[in-house]
Image (cartoon, rainbow, N blue to C red):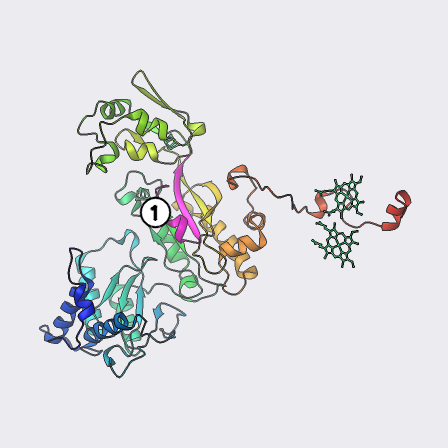
Amino acid sequence: MAKHETPFLDELENGPWPSFVSDLKQQAEVRAKNEKGVEFQIPQDCVDDLLGVVELSYKHGRTHWKHGGIVGVFGYGGGVIGRYCDQPKLFPGVEHFHTMRVNQPCGKYYSTEYLRQLTELWDFRGSGVTNMHGATGDIILLGTTTPQLEEVFWTLTHDFGQDLGGSGSNLRTPADCLGQSRCEYSCYDTSALCHFLTNEYQDELHRPAFPYKFKFKFDGCPNCCVASIARSDMSFIGTWKDDIRIDQDAVNKYVEKDPAYPANAGAHKGRDWGPFDIKKEVLDLCPTHCMKFENKKLTINTEHCTRCMHCINVMPRALKIGKETGLSILCGAKAPILDGAQMGSLLVPFVEVNADNDYEAITEIIENIWDWWMEEGKNRERLGELIMRQGFQKLLEVTGIEAQPQHVAYPRTNPYIFWKEDEVPGGWERDVDEYRKHHLR
Ligand code: HEM
Ligand code: HEM
Ligand code: SF4
Ligand code: SF4
């Protein structure tokens, strides 16, 4: 018998999609029966009370969590999001309902053994409710009390070799696309780089030292499966410098509609789009029109190819990324608050990804940007906003990168151009009397 009536939530048990309400009810029941004899460290009925308070919010159309909450573990300045219910008498089980962020493995590959020990810990010391995963990437353990935080942290670190993720004005938990683990488009080992930089910058992740939050994300190619260009202050996107590798026999298999070679690996097979037409679906859609198909031979003018991925995405068995691979770095993506949404702007068109020298070329750029933003960034100003305020030119200066046409989608249209004094013959110091000798009042 459920603790609270939930008529609004009950509606959400209908329909084909997996219902979070059904799952929460199941978890409430598992805790009520407690067949495993767990010595629950937080109220046994916390999930019932969670359903109760969410139902109340459905009724009122308003949240019932109090403002903010500052909790954590010693040594760290972040990792836990404190929260308290504003109706603790009605729902004592969620009077404290803190969220712990746990740093996920790259590509989110797990063993059942790892997940089982994590869920056992969370059933014991938390609500047993999770978010797999938070939008930044963390494993999210949803709901526990303050005294349990150090206990969970102890077991995570001592027994599981597992650390917390980031929160606050610091480096947040980095995340990657699954990269070379199972994608033939991946231009570098996203997981290796993501893992290395997460370890390299643990201090910046656990102890807030920045003007505001800062995120890294790693995409193996411009398809951007982890959406780094939109969701990270520094976005690392794989690419290549040389030619796209063309297997002419395979191209002709596509053209001849060999069933083993469906366009886009069969992604559109749910609807009849007619027979594959290489001109219509590939050549004419190439954004730079740099492809030709003549006498059963496909050619690509590499000089004009922008590596948009379209042709490779359509004919994955025939076209492959080049061999001279690396990545591009884009900076400044952020959500609208304060002064408008931004996507990453291209800073480094191409840089090598070299694990042998600990990714020196990449860490140097990161640290130069941090040196600048940490000094010049205003309180709660994202990197993208500092770039707008002080100018992209300043970003180029602090990273020691020479301006090049690839840095802009188009040149400026306004003529409010600043010059440095030493670029102008004679400088800025002028004597008006000297001027008057030639120009009478
Ligand atoms: C034959 C007569 C004149 C010519 C050919 C002339 C030409 C110009 C030109 C080419 C500009 C620059 C526009 C720009 O930056 O886009 C300008 C700006 C200006 N002129 Fe004249 N002008 C003349 C007379 C005058 C007079 C008589 C006055 C005032 C009494 C005047 C006041 C200004 C002012 C205030 C500006 C704006 C300066 C700025 O944008 O910083 N001009 N003029
Ligand atoms: C006490 C008298 C005046 C004051 C306080 C004054 C103040 C200003 C200010 C604050 C601006 C804007 C500057 C900027 O955009 O950065 C301006 C622009 C301008 N003023 Fe005056 N002004 C005065 C008299 C005059 C007179 C007498 C003339 C013309 C005979 C004049 C012509 C202009 C012009 C053409 C501009 C536009 C310049 C541009 O768009 O770049 N002003 N003035
Ligand atoms: S971003 Fe590119 S490399 Fe990474 S998983 Fe997606 S398609 Fe593959
Ligand atoms: S990757 Fe894009 S720009 Fe390059 S040849 Fe293919 S479709 Fe054209």
Q: Which residue is mark 1?
A: 190
Q: Amino acid at mark 1?
A: Thr
Which residue is pictured at 32% across the width and 58% down the height? 135
Side of 11 where 355 appears, left or right: right
Q: Can residue 37 be seen?
A: no
Which residue is pictured at 30% across the width and 53% down the height? 106
Where residue 154 appears, as percent x and y from the top left, is 28, 72
Look at the image and give the residue range highlighted in magenta. 219-241
- The quadrant in which residue 173 appears is bottom left
Ligand 4 occupies quarter:
top left
Asked if residue 233 is among those painted magenta in the image, a careful observer would answer yes
Whether ligand 3 has any atom under 8 Å from the Cβ at mark 1 is answered as yes
Which residue is pictured at 22% across the width and 24% down the height? 253
Side of 238 where 252 appears, left or right: left
Q: Can residue 135 be seen?
A: yes
Identify the element where label 1 is drawn: helix
Is 157 located above or below residue 370 in the figure? below
10 Å crowding of disc 1: few (<14), some (14-19), many (20+): many
In terms of depth relative to the viewer, which is nearer, 148 or 307?
307
Where residue 373 appears, as percent x and y from the top left, is 53, 58
How many marks the image carries: the answer is 1
